[in-house]
Image: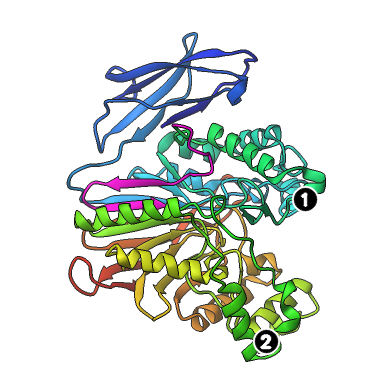
Amino acid sequence: MLWTRVSGYDIAVEVLWQVSLDELFKERVSQGVVVTGPERDFTVKALPNGLKPATRYWFRFLIDGAASPTGRTRTLPSGHVKRLRIAVASCSNYCFGYFNAYDAMAKDPDLHFVLHTGDYLYEYGTNEWGDDQGKLLGRAHQPPHEMVSLADYRTRHAQYKLDVGAQAMHAAHPCLLVWDDHESANNPWTGGAQNHQPQTEGEWLKRRAAALKAWYEWMPVRDPINGEPPENYWRTFVFGDLATLVCLETRHTARAEQIDYSDHRARIIDDSSRDQFLKDVLGAEERPMISSSMEKVIDSSLRQSVAQRQPWRLLGNAIPMGGMSLPDLTSIDFVNNRADDEDIAELLWKSRWNLPWYTDTWDGYPRARERLYQQCAASGARDMVVLTGDSHSFWFNVLADDAGNNMGVELGTSGITSPGDFLDLGFSTAEAGRLDQHIAEGMPEVHWTDNLHNGYLQIEITPENIHASCIALNTICELLFTTAVIKETWITRSEGTFGTLQMQLV
């Protein structure tokens, strides 16, 4: 999918697109004309036909002979695939800093694809999260108020696309996309969102429709076809005989409303009442995460992958899947000493009762997670590699179902610019590092985590193993930056092509 946006016009305009095997466009292999106008905010999409698999192409757009900057792209492979390299990105908040991680991806000539797992942009207005940093850097959100209308969402998308790193990444690599919450509003579910107030912001479904329309306009994805509802966004990508990637929709088609701890806090007074809350409230049967239509896509994609004996099955997943119930933090002096801080007091209370860190993640929908695990198992896929964003932290997790059976691994990426929770709460770097270690030691499914760095995850897949590297940036406050690998892991199998996955940290 080729994408651009035309500036400087107020009526419909014809745009010529061209695809070539060379950067000088001497070997053009496909071209066509697209008409765009105000009805789609002058965005342009083109889907060339007849391209060869596993091939790099260059593309450009022309209006009245004037050419756009040249971009390059790559088609999906078919047949035997020896190696696949994917960058996993998440949580790019314009206010917090420059999208240097995107720039680093653009400069990687060996990268094949970028998987963005959501929170590509944020809906917040001035005097909200990130605004102080945005003013310091000259990157305050536009429009200055929270996005609600179609014009708001279009304006914000346009602002994010002005970042030089974002432009470089999109011009260098194809982007596979999953949406999360902030593309529309914070913590949405099928009937609303945490920061949507109907009395002042109108009907939720109208706001959601505006958000999704702008997202489809401004992102390099295929538009819905044959009357398919725009919220039914799920994609399966097949990389020859090596891997299948299924991207999940967990926000707008089935999700039940999130549980708010404040509604139940007074009832949790001992281990017994805590267990009852986890079973009857968080674990209620009628709290789905993904729709029946999405389940059918997952089932058919996984069964096909297993039948074709691909070694790897990947899930593109917006929110953490692994169990992340907080270990007790009350014995840590530098945390307990700040119990008068409202947010830290809440953290301490959850840790006291070993409750899930967040109820907006899969931890808040344990029955839905178990249903997904059982569906994967029924498809012959107890070896999922889950690629996750959302948490602004790096994660290496080993997943297990309720019976303790290994279900695969989870590789989580940090935020492009959004800060980790511990630093955002005001802990020092050293304190946040100690909390990371305490978290990893106290959460059974977590093998390692890092809440300190912005960056992205790089995974290299071969038939034998997966090598994952956490790429951290030294700064997001300046355009001159360096990167470093801060942790690596190898994913292998204990036995055969479909054996249990093993994680070995480096």
In the rendered structure, does residue 233 fall within the stretch colored magenta?
A: yes
- Under circle 2, the secondary element is loop
Q: Is residue 17 visible?
A: yes
Give the camera-side residue of 275 and 411.
275
Residue 395 is tagged as none
- Under circle 1, the secondary element is loop
Residue neighbourhood size for the residue with mark 1, other residues' Cα within 10 Å, grouped as few (<14), some (14–19), many (≥20): few
The residue that appears at 37% across and 55% down in the rendered structure is: 298
The residue that appears at 62% across and 70% down in the rendered structure is: 429
Measuring from the top left, give residue 293's x and y in whole percent.
43, 50
Asked if residue 489 is positioned above or below residue 119 in the image, the reply reads below
Span highlighted in magenta in the image: 226-247
Amino acid type at image mark 2 = Thr
Quickly name the residue at label 2: 330
Question: Which numbered disc, 2 or 1, marks the residue that appears first in the sequence?
Answer: 1
Q: Quadrant of the N terminus?
A: top left
The residue that appears at 55% across and 74% down in the rendered structure is: 283
